[in-house]
Amino acid sequence: MRKCGPVDCNTHSRKLVSMVFSRKKREIESSRKIQTSSVRSTLSSHASGHPPGKHSKLNWAYWSLPLLLTCVQYWVTATSMHEIRYEELAESVRNVFWLSHRTVYDGVSSNVGWYGLLLFVYQLFGFSLFSAKFVKLGLYLIGITCAADILRCCMDVRTAIVPLIAIGLSPTLLYMGSVQTGIGVDLPYAAISLWLVLSVRPDAHSPLEL
């Protein structure tokens, strides 16, 4: 067995000491990072102005807003069930009937996306004179929920409540959601499509980052 000289032994001992010091340094840095992240989270919760329990209640109240707004839309829809207009009959009954025979009534009746959705619902659940109103109500619920999620990704909960209520209680949106025509169906479709696009990019915190 070969004995190491004084120079070799000193070099080997220096390497061991440097390895031990580097390992200890990494452990200290990792512990400091953990402490810093915990301190930052604590400071952010204090800076937000409400404790974690209140924050959870605020989140619960925010995510209950789409259901409450849908109840408002249902009330507006229910008040219009005492009558049905000619345009509603054409858009929800006549044009759907012609689409079931793979044709359209005329050149103006070309909203195949709306007629196809109603035809699918009629074949699945059966026909009813006011079924189209409930189809729009379901689209309203899905669309306003997607809009709530998009707003929550863009801003704080307390800030997102205001535009969500403004969108949900829009008189134009409430009126278009109560009639059986195809007007206004592009609005919930737009919210659903934007939510699907954002779900493909989970790292994007805002629609502007697309």
Image (spheres, rainbow, N blue to C red):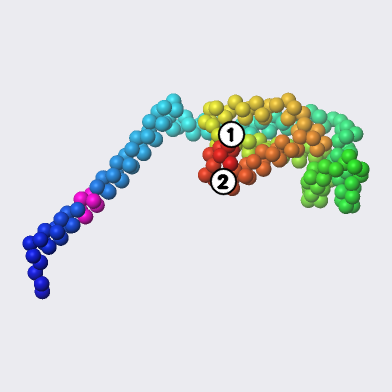
* Label annotation for residue 192: none
Q: Amino acid at mark 1?
A: Leu
Residue of label 2: 201
Is residue 123 at all visible to an observer of this figure? yes
Task: Give the residue at x 21% y 55%.
Answer: 19
Q: Residue 189's image quarter? A: top right
Query: Residue 73, percent across and down?
Result: 72, 31
Which range of residues does the magenta coloring cover? 19-24
Residue of label 1: 151
Indicate the quadrant containing the C terminus: top left, top right, bottom left or bottom right. top right
Q: Which is more toward the observer, 26 or 143?
A: 26
**Marks 2 and 1 close (CB-CB < 8 Å):** no
Q: Amino acid at mark 2?
A: Arg
Q: Residue 85's image quarter? A: top right
Judge left or right: residue 10 versus residue 42: left
Task: Give the residue at x 33% y 42%.
Answer: 34
Query: Residue 28, percent across and down?
Result: 26, 45
Query: Residue 55, percent across and down?
Result: 48, 31
Q: Secondary structure at mark 1?
A: helix
Is residue 122 at all visible to an observer of this figure? no
Mark closer to the observer (2, 1): 2
Judge left or right: residue 107 versus residue 134: right
Q: Secondary structure at mark 2?
A: loop
Question: Is 126 located above or below residue 142 in the figure?
Answer: below
